[in-house]
Amino acid sequence: MKKNILFLSFALILLSSCNKKSVPADNSTTSQETFTHPKAPKAQGTPRILFIGNSHTEYFVSTPILFSELCKANNQLMDIDQLITMGVSIDEIYADHEAEAEQNFAETDKDGNYYDYVIIQESTPVAIAEPDRYQENVKMIVKEIHKNSPDAALYIYEGMSPIAFTDPDYKEYYDEMRNNAISVMKNTKNAGLLRVGDAVNDAYNGKNGYKYLVGNKDNLRYGQNTLHLLNDGGFMQAVLLYATIFDKKPSIPTELTLSTGTGDNDDMKKQDVNKAISNPKALEEIAFSNR
């Protein structure tokens, strides 16, 4: 699959410094905070999850595919839908998939909730620099979701600092992304936080003995104007989602669908987890601790 470089607008990110929220003096993060998980409706039949997002949901690796494979390996039934467009915000994703979205949101189930879980991922520039638009976009899409899924468990995707861990501004953007996601979560009915940013931050900081540098290259993320999850990061994100929803660690299958590389001719295919992931046990533990 040809990978096109995504040119996201970092002007918005840089301008966000004018609107920075204050960071706690002790530099505390959500790893010290406790969040209530949303309550999923009692499903009649197979539960259904919807992914709404862009390239952080699916690019070098696919969270919907990996999550589906974890569910199958653990005999956890789950139907999976997705509305994904590269490099855009929630409102633009909805506009791009309007006919499909309207059809999905009009579907009904006997239990009164077509979707049992929804993952909502905003674009990086909006999630950092436009908190009001972030709130409005989530409010808009939740209104559509609630038409026939009024009790769906919603998870706000906590994005990652868009720049390298070694950049002096990494922590500032990480905190801003976290603060804005928490604010959206608190203003959304029956919502929780999918703590991707926290898990990635823990991995960078070497939690559970994980080492992100392999041959002096970042083994978690890769990119030019924004960094996207590689096999290590994508694996951790999928395990985090499973652990967040089901409150337990998944059994990891021998093979998962992972990226063969970052070039134009690379693609995703089934690969041996222990060969394609540098330290699956450490990443599994990091994911579980951020559920």
Image (tube, grey):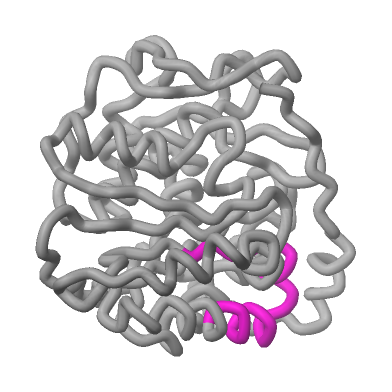
Is 268 above or below relative to 15? above
Side (left or right) of 84 relative to 78: right
Examine the image and state in which quarter residue 156 appears: bottom left
Q: Nearer the viewer, residue 54 or 215?
A: 54
Looking at the image, which is closer to me, 76 or 212?
76
Q: Residue furthest right?
A: 11
138 w.r.t. 196: above or below: below
User: In the displayed structure, does residue 136 sit left or right of residue 51?
Assistant: right
- State the extent of the magenta-drawn residues as a range: 120-138
The residue that appears at 20% across and 57% down in the rendered structure is 47
On the image, the x and y values in percent for residue 118 come to 38, 64
Left or right relative to 184: residue 46: left
Q: Residue at x 50, y 81 (%)?
A: 184
Residue 124 in view (yes/no): no
Q: Quadrant of the N terminus?
A: top right
Figure quadrant of residue 188: bottom left
Name above or below for residue 5 compared with residue 77.
Answer: above
The spot of residue 165 in percent (x, y) is 64, 44
State whether residue 88 appears in this view.
Answer: yes
**Which residue: 22% across, 69% down?**
109
Pinpoint residue 117: horizontal percent, then vertical percent: 31, 64
Q: Main secondary structure of the magenta part?
A: helix
Which quadrant of the view contains residue 146?
A: bottom left
Q: Image point 59% across, 67% down: which residue?
A: 177
